[in-house]
Image (cartoon, rainbow, N blue to C red):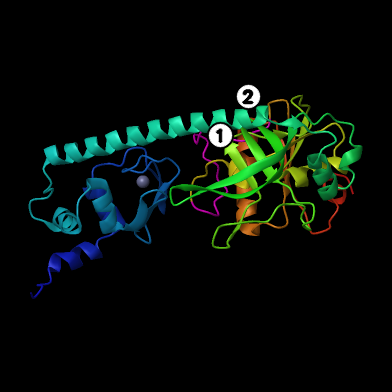
Amino acid sequence: MALVHDPRIDDARDRSMREVLDKLPPLAGVKFGKREGVGPCPKCGGDDRFSINLKTRVYNCRSCGGGDHIGLVRLVLDCDFMEAIEFLEGERGVEIDPAERERRRKVREDQKEKDEADEAQYRAWAIRDAISIWQACQPFRGTLAEEYLAFRVPGFEFLPLAFMCFRFIPDLPYVKRIKKRNHTLHSGPVLVAAVQAPDGMMRAVHRTWIDLDQPSGKAQIFTPDGKPLPSKVVRGSKQGGAIRLTGNACGSSMVSGEGIETTLTALVGGVLPGASYWAGVDLGNMSGKRVGGKFSDEPDMDGGPSFVPPCTVDDFWLIKDGDSEPRETQAKLTACAKRAMRINPGLSAHIVPTVPGGDLNTMIKRPGEQ
Ligand SMILES: [Zn+2]
């Protein structure tokens, strides 16, 4: 079968993104700057995920994917390629029956509601699971978990603090779901840390599988086909939570690193006397949702629960881990710092880089100090 090339395809390809946007129904909530539009995705509604570049004529949604200006027509109208061409170049304008569009919209909405309900149910289940893990723990002092932290953070054992955030399990299976089946890939002693939500409630546990025979002190865990897996796994809902190393009470300054060990290293160093030391669980949790792509440092202020220091804090130090990808790490920590400063305009935030073997004491200096 010979295909006859439809010249309207070329006409459609030649159109600018602005022309396409003028023809489409307005995209609710999408704010346009000179070069870019950012806002909720017209298909999935995802905030902070959707952007349109007017110059390069591409759009992108972190859930639905991306494409060119013709792809955008397909996304918005939920139509196929030729329907999009017809819409852009057809003499009769919109060719898709309004009733059919309404039907498609309804299907999408129902699916979104169902997904949200499933997610809420899954989260509730994960939180219950986290609480039962916590309840099955032993006290932390005098256990292998304390030994692990003393091994990773020299001087830890001399800190005169209660560390209520830590507990210990002598033998916990490491279970991973692969291809719809649960696999127990390892079992052993675990340091369990409570992740407290901004309201103080514990909604997740952070677990570190320990093996003091390894140089890192952490267990080496592999998939059945030999791929390495993280020895630290969070269970529950960590959203905006923190591991409160120095407890709930919070003064005017706070030091936060991504990991327990990094933040404890600063604590052992006595970097800021009287400060609270809260670990941010992971970088994604610290940055919260962001507007734009992977390297964006712009926090989405409407993006749900986020890691923010309590309102008593006006001096906030973020420790940048040396072993993470530098550009993305910087972007995520900057987003965290910007969010904290926007929520509390009296707060000043600082990002402190660590260098391998570097001394945090020499890096954290108050303004004016030498
Ligand atoms: Zn989307």
Q: Is residue 159 visible?
A: yes
Residue at x 10%, y 73% (from the top left corner): 3
Residue 41 belongs to the span the image colors magenta: no
Dividing the picture into quadrants, the one containing residue 233 is top right
Q: As shown in the figure, which amino acid type bears the numbered disc 2?
A: Met
- Helix, strand or loop status at disc 2: loop
Of 304 and 110, nearer the camera is 110
Q: Residue at x 24, y 61 (%)?
A: 15
| Residue 367 visible from this viewpoint | no
In the rendering, which numbered label is found on residue 149? none
Q: Quadrant of the N terminus?
A: bottom left
Task: Report the disc number at residue 237.
Answer: 1
Distance from the alpha carbon under mark 2 to that under mark 1: 11 Å
Would residue 298 be counted in the magenta stretch?
Answer: yes
Where residue 242 sits: x, y (%)? Answer: 67, 35
Q: Quick one: label 1, few (<14), some, or many (20+) residues within 10 Å?
A: many
Q: Position of residue 173 (x, y in %)?
A: 63, 43
User: Residue sitting at 67 percent across and 29 percent down?
Assistant: 136
Residues rendered magenta in the picture: 293-309
* Amino acid identity at mark 1: Ser
Determine the main secondary structure of the stretch shown in magenta.
loop
Q: Does residue 223 appear to the left or right of 105 in the view shown?
A: right
Please name whichever residue, 12 or 44, is drawn nearer the observer in this view of the structure. 44
